[in-house]
Image (spheres, rainbow, N blue to C red):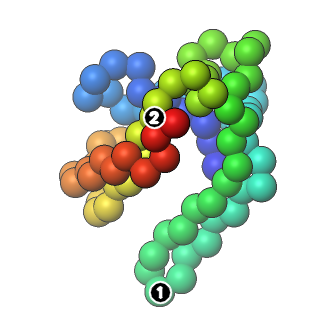
């Protein structure tokens, strides 16, 4: 499943946005593994006004975080940040 998380503080692991609705604002999600490659796709609402810490994509620039490699204790060993969808 796809869960909506955010990073509350620098160098901290992502926190679930709303524990009662882990996929809040997310629809059409799909997760698959083929030839050892995990692929995830989803649609995200630009804004959900009644959820604290929901980032407003209609007013702010944003970055797509792409991670590759193993995860240990909630931390990625190698991370690349790519600004693909700047408003």
The quarter holding residue 36 reads bottom left
Say which of marks 2 and 1 sits in front: 2
**Furthest-left residue in this view:** 77
Say which residue appears at 32% left-offset and 61% top-offset: 68
Residue 42: % across, % down: 67, 54
Q: Nearer the viewer, residue 54 or 13?
A: 54
**In the rendered picture of this protein, how many numbered marks are placed on residues?**
2
Say which residue appears at 55% left-offset and 76% top-offset: 33
In the picture provided, is 41 more to the left or to the right than 5? right
Res. 69 visible in picture = yes
Residue 81's disc is none
Say few, some or many: other residues with alpha carbon within 10 Å of mark 2 (under 14 / 14 to 19 / 20 or more). Answer: some
Above or below, comparing residue 70 to residue 87 in the picture: below
Residue under pointer 1: 35
Res. 19 visible in picture = no
Say which residue appears at 62% left-offset and 42% top-offset: 3
In the picture provided, is 32 more to the left or to the right than 45? left
Q: Nearer the viewer, residue 69 or 27?
A: 27
- Tell me, yes or no, whether the two marked residues, 2 and 1, touch with CB atoms within 8 Å: no
SS at badge 2: loop
SS at badge 1: loop
Residue 30: % across, % down: 69, 63
Residue 63: % across, % down: 41, 40
Residue 62's disc is 2
Q: Nearer the viewer, residue 66 or 34?
A: 66
Above or below, comparing residue 49 to residue 33 in the picture: above
Q: CA distance from mark 2 to mark 1?
A: 30 Å
The quarter holding residue 39 reads bottom right
């Amino acid at each position: 499943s796809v869960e909506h998380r955010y990073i509350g503080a620098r160098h901290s692991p992502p926190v679930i946005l709303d524990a009662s609705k882990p996929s809040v604002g997310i629809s059409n999600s799909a997760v698959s593994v083929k030839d050892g490659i995990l692929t995830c796709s989803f649609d995200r609402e630009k804004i959900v006004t009644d959820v604290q810490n929901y980032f407003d994509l209609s007013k702010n620039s944003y970055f797509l975080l792409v991670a590759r490699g193993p995860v240990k204790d909630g931390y990625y060993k190698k991370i690349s940040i790519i600004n693909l969808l700047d408003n």
